[in-house]
Structures are given as structure tokens and as C-alpha cells.
Image (cartoon, rainbow, N blue to C red):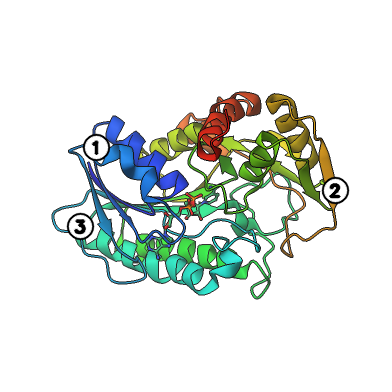
Amino acid sequence: MRILITGAAGFLGSHLSEKLLLEGHSVIGMDNFLTGDPQNLAHLTTNENFSFIRHDVSNFIFVPGKLDAVLHFASPASPNKDSPYGYPNLPIQTMKAGALGTHNALGVAKANNAIFLLASTSEIYGDPKEHPQKESYWGNVDPTGPRSMYDEAKRFAEALTMSYHRFHGINTRIVRIFNTYGPRMRLDDGRVIPNFIQQALKNEPLTIYGEGTQTRSFCYVDDLIDGIYRLLLSDIHEPVNIGNPVEMSVLELALKINEIINNPAGIIVKDDKRLGDDPERRRPDISKAKTLLDWEPEYPLTQGLSKTIPYFRIKLGIK
Ligand SMILES: NC(=O)c1ccc[n+]([C@@H]2O[C@H](COP(=O)([O-])OP(=O)(O)OC[C@H]3O[C@@H](n4cnc5c(N)ncnc54)[C@H](O)[C@@H]3O)[C@@H](O)[C@H]2O)c1
């Protein structure tokens, strides 16, 4: 297939580009480097099946030649309000990528009669009243809250995708991605795993905000990309959760990272300064992916972290 990936220079977009090239497809990456990094694609630029277009997806998308699939991943993705790359500091860009960007990406898919796959998120469930979260759960989101620029943009993007499917008959997919980690995450976008790894590698105490009792489920990137690839090849138009259902508290995560890196500095507890409406619990119900895609994650956290830490060592110049 000849595939357009928006957000290709980001963490997930770059891994997805790599996977699709390995599977024999031809990839056109598109990105405006708002939160991504050209370095993430540097190893692909010599591949004759890869090309790149620098473009903001909030503007009309045109790609010369026939496309078979459009994968829409362009959007800021970190909730950290202290990072310039967090969506709280890029609220309009985030809403535009989710709303106008999805519209433009659907438009180019329609013009090419191509498959369209939307990167949605577990954040559409908000602070969930149901646990674990099944795809049938409608969510608990404040439409004007501090996370609304991201959550509502993605909810709109899902609704627009289903509208194009139902009204125009576009061959769409929606993946609801739960927290994913791995090499090529930004050091400075404030997501919890790069933050902790960075502090541990510098032998600093790991900062826990509040009590650290909020839970998350972390999926290693190779597992996620495998699930997305299976979804792309399927004919499932309804949303599918892809994530790792092993749930742990942020405190447990910190202790695990300190143990693997052998960081003697321990943890430090600071006053809670997380962005408001931070979900207390988050765990995917992946029965649908198991049944329909024959997919489940393979990497336990320790193994995934062991594949991730060397990347940050190199980035930080720590031996
Ligand atoms: N990583 C996760 O755990 C996770 C979880 C849920 C959903 N997602 C979704 O997956 C997608 C990728 O996330 P990521 O973690 O790789 O984030 P990322 O910030 O590393 O990548 C996003 C990419 O999109 C690009 N981009 C942003 N706005 C753009 C625009 N207007 N035009 C062109 N390019 C633009 C950025 O420059 C960046 O390269 C996002 O849509 C995100 O919402 C990620």
C-alpha cells in the first residue's frame, strides 16, 4: 500500500512509519514539527520507499499520486502543563489538529478512496466512572475543563470519522490508544516515563506529585504498533482499545524504574501540581482487540523499560 502518515516525526508516527516500511509498504510522512523531531525520521530518509512532506494538517492536504491509506496521528499528546510541548500550552493547535486536521485527513482519504485510520485516545473516557474501560463506555469529560482541548478534539475527531464512514462510506478505523512508552519519546514533553527515567539516570530522586496512588497502564511501543497494524488490515469500523491492561500506581512505577536503573536517590513527594481532572484510574479492557484482532501485548513493563532506557542514556549522554 502507499500510505500517508500525519504526525510521522513524532514518537508513535516514526515507529509506525518504520513498521509499515518493514512490511513492504511505501510511506509518505507528513509533519510540521510542532512537537516532533526530524531526528526521529533520520534513519528512514535513505529508504527509497519513504518520503516526507513538511505541512501543517490544519491546512488543506494535497499529496500527489494515489494513496491507499491515510493514518492520522498529528496532534500534541502530552498533558504536562509545564512543558512547552504539552497540549495545555498548545490548546488552539491541539483543537485544530483534532478538528481541522482530521477533516483534512479524511478529505484526502475520500479523494483517494483510501482507508482512514484515526489515532484516538483513552482520554476520550475522561475521568472514568467505569473500570476497566470498554469501548462501549461513553466517558466522563468536562467539555470546558483544563484537558478539554485534547479530549474534546479527539471526541470530535471520532464523531467526524464515523460521520465520514456512515455518510460517505469511507473505510475507516479508530484506535483508542492507552499510555504508550518507548524510545523516541521527547525528553522534555513531561510525560511520566521519560521524566522518571531521566531523573533516575541522573541519580536524582523521582518526583511524585500528590500521593502517587493514581494508576496507569503502560504499553510498550512495539506492542501498540503491532495492534494498530492488525487494526489497519482488519475491517473494523468501530473504535478499538489498544493498550496494556496491567495496571500500576505511579508510585509503583517510580520504584520499578529506580530498581532497574539502580538509582539510590529514591523518590521525593511534592504537592500535587498535576493538570486538573487527571484521571485517578486508567486501564483498557482489551477483549475486543483480543477477539477481533487476535492481539494482546507481549512486553512486560520490565522488558519494555529495558529497551527504552538505553535510548535515554544516549540522549542524555550518560554512560
Ligand atoms: N503516546 C501515547 O501514549 C498516546 C496515547 C493516546 C493517543 N496518542 C495519540 O497518538 C498520536 C501521536 O502521539 P505521540 O505520542 O507520538 O505524540 P508526538 O507529540 O510525539 O507526535 C505527534 C506528532 O504530530 C505532529 N503534529 C502536531 N500537530 C501537527 C500539525 N498541525 N500538522 C502536522 N503535524 C503535526 C508533531 O510535530 C509530532 O511529530 C497523537 O494523535 C496522540 O493523540 C498517543
Q: Would you call the spot at circle 2 few (<14 residues within 10 Å), some (14-19), or many (20 or more)?
A: some
Q: Amino acid at mark 1?
A: His
Mark 1 → mark 3, Cα distance in angstroms: 17 Å
Residue 203 lies, with reference to residue 70, above or below; the image says above
Residue 308 placement (x, y as % from top left) = 55, 32
Residues at marks 1 and 3 touching, judged by CB atoms closer than 8 Å: no
Q: Would you call the spot at circle 1 few (<14 residues within 10 Å), some (14-19), or many (20 or more)?
A: some
Residue 250, located in which quarter of the rendered image?
top right
Q: Amino acid at mark 2?
A: Val
Q: Is residue 279 left or right of residue 227?
A: right
The mark lying in front, picked from 2 and 3, is 2
Residue 34, located in which quarter of the rendered image?
bottom left
Mark 2 or 3 closer to N-term?
Answer: 3
Mark 1 → mark 2, Cα distance in angstroms: 47 Å
User: How many numbered circles does the render carry?
Assistant: 3
The mark lying in front, picked from 1 and 3, is 1
Residue 220 placement (x, y as % from top left) = 55, 34
Q: In this view of the protein, which residue sits in the foreground, 127 or 263?
A: 263
Q: Would you call the spot at circle 3 few (<14 residues within 10 Å), some (14-19), or many (20 or more)?
A: some
In this figure, which residue is indicated by the disc labeled 2?
269
In this figure, which residue is indicated by the disc labeled 1?
25
Residue 144 placement (x, y as % from top left) = 65, 76
In this figure, which residue is indicated by the disc labeled 3?
112
Mark 1 or 3 closer to N-term?
Answer: 1
Quadrant housing the C terminus: top right
Q: Residue at x 62, y 59 (%)?
A: 79
Q: Residue at x 79, y 47 (%)?
A: 208
Q: Residue at x 74, y 26 (%)?
A: 259
Residue 235 in view in this figure: no
Residue 199 lies, with reference to residue 150, above or below; the image says above
Residue 183 placement (x, y as % from top left) = 50, 37
Mark 1 or 2 closer to N-term?
Answer: 1
